[in-house]
Image (cartoon, helix red, strand yellow):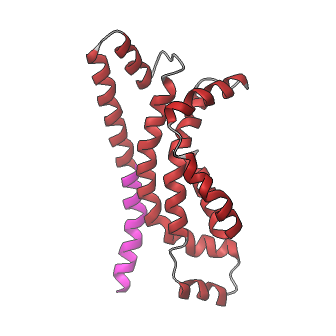
Amino acid sequence: MGTVLGLLLAVLIVHSRTLERALLPWIVASQTVPVLAIAPIVLIVLGSLGFTGTLPKAVIAMYLCFFPVTVAMVQGLRAPQLIENELMHTYAATRAQTLWWLRLPASLPFLFPALRVGIAAGLVGAIVAELPTGAQAGLGARLLTGSYYGNTVQIWSALVMASVLGLALTAAVRGVEIAALGRRSQAAGGRA
């Protein structure tokens, strides 16, 4: 959800100077609010609307991971050089065609590092989201019950599992990155 939101915001920002001036300061400001302060509010508001379970936790994780994707993709979507943009204009490409055939491929080297940062932030958000809910399962719940009862083994096991999960998810994104960009770099190397 955070990746989709980040991509949509980046496309909107790149295509409209007005939206850039209107949205970008708020996007940056959103990350100055500590997640520990906002998580209970989000959980209460979504709970009062009837949303319980995994969705409120996913929203909090999304809140943390959309930012790196948005900022990186704005840079990535603006990465094509002027001559490349002029070539698309020469071919009478529409904005959508320019986005699809030029801007998105040029932004891939920016996207994957942002996804790795977003995974780490989202994992922290999911763990923090479990703390005020009194969840019975999950890493945040294990950390909380371990701290209540002074069970350091439970605390450390939850921290180790969070680290392993973060490493596994990051490695999965790295694998997708190698598959996607590996072909691209091989094609560029064959032309040189």
* Residue found at the very far right of the displayed protein: 49
* Residue located 31% across and 17% down the image: 154
- In this rendering, position of residue 139 left or right of residue 135: left
The magenta stretch spans which residues? Answer: 173-192
Q: Residue furthest bottom?
A: 90
Asked if one can make out residue 16 in the rendered structure from this viewpoint, the answer is no
Please tell me whether the stretch drawn in magenta is mainly helix, strand or loop: helix
Residue 159 spot, x, y in % from top left: 32, 28
Magenta span includes 107: no
Q: Is residue 48 visible?
A: yes
Which one is in front, 77 or 64?
Answer: 64
- Asked if residue 175 is among those painted magenta in the image, a careful observer would answer yes
Instruction: Identify whether 23 is placed above or below 18.
Output: above
At a point 68% along the width and 81% down the height, the residue shown is 93
What percent of the width, then of the height, locates residue 148? 38, 11
Q: Residue 102 vs residue 145: left or right?
A: right
Task: State the residue in front, 128 or 108.
Answer: 128
Q: Nearer the viewer, residue 16 or 142?
A: 16
The C terminus: image quadrant = bottom left
Residue drawn 45% across the image and 64% down it:
110
Residue 26 in the image, given as x and y percentages of width and height: 62, 52
- Write the residue at 69% across / 63% down: 19
For residue 112, above or below residue 105: above
The picture places residue 170, in percent across and down from the top left corner, at: 37, 47
